[in-house]
Amino acid sequence: MSVNLREDVKPVSYIKTNAADMLDYVNERKNPVIVTQHGEARGVFLDIESYQNMINAMALLKLLQISEKAIEAGEVYDNAEVFAELKKRLRS
């Protein structure tokens, strides 16, 4: 996913007038379109697959952040301890 500044920056009026074409464009090319208003970037038009991939990546980064904080706090367990606890719980 990359932005072609010549093709992928459009004013909001163009998006409004050509909404169906813009949906086709972002879904076919997988390029985000930067939407401008009064000459300033105001939003991004993105296909759903790319958006879902961004959400998934952010969730994974959040899990990594939580894990790093747990490690820093000393909240770590030996894998043998974890498996022993799991076996114990499964037998109950």
Image (cartoon, rainbow, N blue to C red):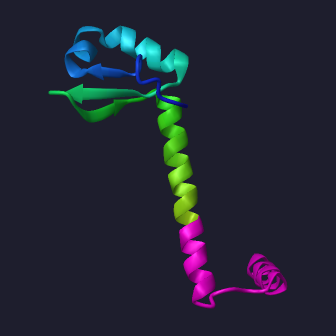
**Nearer to me, 71 or 35:** 35
Residue 20 is left or right of residue 86, and the answer is left
**Nearer to me, 34 or 53:** 34
**Nearer to me, 43 or 89:** 43
Residue 88 painted magenta: yes
Tell me which secondary structure the magenta stretch mostly adopts: helix
Residue placed farthest to the front in the image? 6
Q: Which residues are magenta?
A: 64-92
User: What is the x, y in percent for residue 37?
Assistant: 18, 28
Quick one: quadrant of the C terminus?
bottom right
Residue 30 is left or right of residue 81, and the answer is left
Q: Quadrant of residue 36?
A: top left
Residue at the image point whose x is 41% and y is 16% from the top: 7
Residue at the image point whose x is 73% and y is 80% from the top: 89
**Nearer to me, 81 or 1:** 1
Residue 80 is left or right of residue 27, and the answer is right
Residue 16 is left or right of residue 34, and the answer is left
Residue placed farthest to the left in the image? 38
Is 59 situated above or below 73?
above
Residue 63 painted magenta: no
User: What is the x, y in percent for residue 24?
Assistant: 45, 12
User: What is the x, y in percent for residue 66?
Assistant: 54, 73
Is 72 situated above or below 17?
below
Is 56 situated above or below 89?
above
Residue at the image point whose x is 29% and y is 9% from the top: 18
Q: Quadrant of residue 5?
A: top left
Is 23 situated above or below 38?
above
